[in-house]
Amino acid sequence: MKQYLAIHEEVQHALEKKLPIVALESTIISHGMPYPQNVQMAKEVEQIIRATNAVPATIAIMNGKIKIGLDEEELEELATNKSVEKVSRRDFPYILATRKMGATTVAGTMIAAELAGIHVFATGGIGGVHREGETTWDVSADLTELAQTNVAVVCAGAKSILDIGRTLEYLETHGVPVVGYQCSEFPSFYSRESGFGVDFRLDTPEEVATVMDTKWKLGLKGGLVIANPVPEKDALAYNEIEAVIAQALRETKENGITGKQVTPFLLDRVKQLTGGKSLQTNITLVKHNAEVAAKIAVAFQGIIA
């Protein structure tokens, strides 16, 4: 397995010295945001993690290798190359074997992070059960990955374009703890509300790190969802964003968009329909998640060191 890993010098040093590391996904750069906001956001997120005394490890696939940590040139390539493919669990063999460029989803990043020995990962929002998933069977591989891969995922909840109730039911069925970080209600990405609760509320990085450590020492495989709401001043009103999503979903059906194209289309339409406010909220919540993830990584490393 190690033959497929290419670990950046900064990350390798952190692994050897047992320093805290935070994994970062790359589909948010290649498919989640427009240029140049995407590459600017990626660089700022890495700096936030460094400023919180942890080491960032942005993950992608390039030249037949799983890159654990990217340099500025590689970030720029991910942000501008239109042929970058989204990589989840099923896609690794093909993308590696054909030496295509791939950006890792939440599931893909979790797999690569665990291979490299990284246990904390910051993202925007996890995937989940899509609305009308009971008929389409459109369920993100992020959920099955959370059930089997030992990585804690710090996120602003599930993307609000999803069926959050069914997403939480799926996680419960598969034994994935949903932790509210300083909150009792599960956030819905752009909004701090969803109408659904979390399994447990924890208020400090140390409490989160202790639960992570306890879970894995018990031999209970799988990750944890650390739900970290977008800061109040940057949140969008729940009812307002729900109306926008309903319109975007109608347009998805009308245009016959399916599969892995659904999420990028929906996010782009939501951005247009909110006059760009959703993009700003997205950038803010990713930065906030990175900071919280770095604090958790520092606390977790303090326990296992």
Image (cartoon, rainbow, N blue to C red):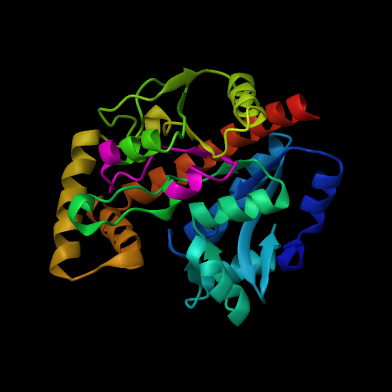
Residue 37 visible, this angle: no
Q: Which residue lies furthest to the bottom in this view?
A: 98
User: Where's residue 84, x and y in %?
Assistant: 51, 73
Q: In this view, does 224 lie above or below 81?
A: above
Residue drawn at x 17%, y 70% is 255
In which image quadrant can residue 165 be found? top left
Q: In which quarter of the image is the C terminus?
A: top right
Residue 27 in the image: x percent, y percent?
Answer: 49, 60
Give the residues drawn in magenta, as a range: 144-166
Q: Can residue 128 be seen in this view?
A: yes
Horizontal side of 97 relative to 189 (left or right) equals right
Of residues 203 and 74, the one nearer the viewer is: 203
Q: Residue visible at 54% across and 65% down?
A: 103
- Determine the image quadrant of residue 65: bottom right
How many marks the image carries: the answer is 0
Residue 247 in the image: above or below residue 21: below
Residue at 84% x, 49% y is 13
Q: Where is residue 283 in the image (x, y as percent from the top left)?
A: 46, 47
Q: Is residue 151 magenta?
A: yes
Which residue is painted at 26% across and 43% down in the image?
Answer: 163
Does the magenta-highlighted stretch encompass residue 253?
A: no
In which quadrant will I find the N terminus?
bottom right
Residue 142 vertical position relative to residue 66 in the rendered view, above or below:
above
From the viewer's side, name the closer residue of 168 and 156: 168
Left or right position of 91 against 68: left
Rendering coords of residue 7 (x, y %): 76, 59
Give left or right: position of 233 versus 211. Answer: left
Q: Looking at the image, which is closer to me, 302 or 52?
A: 302
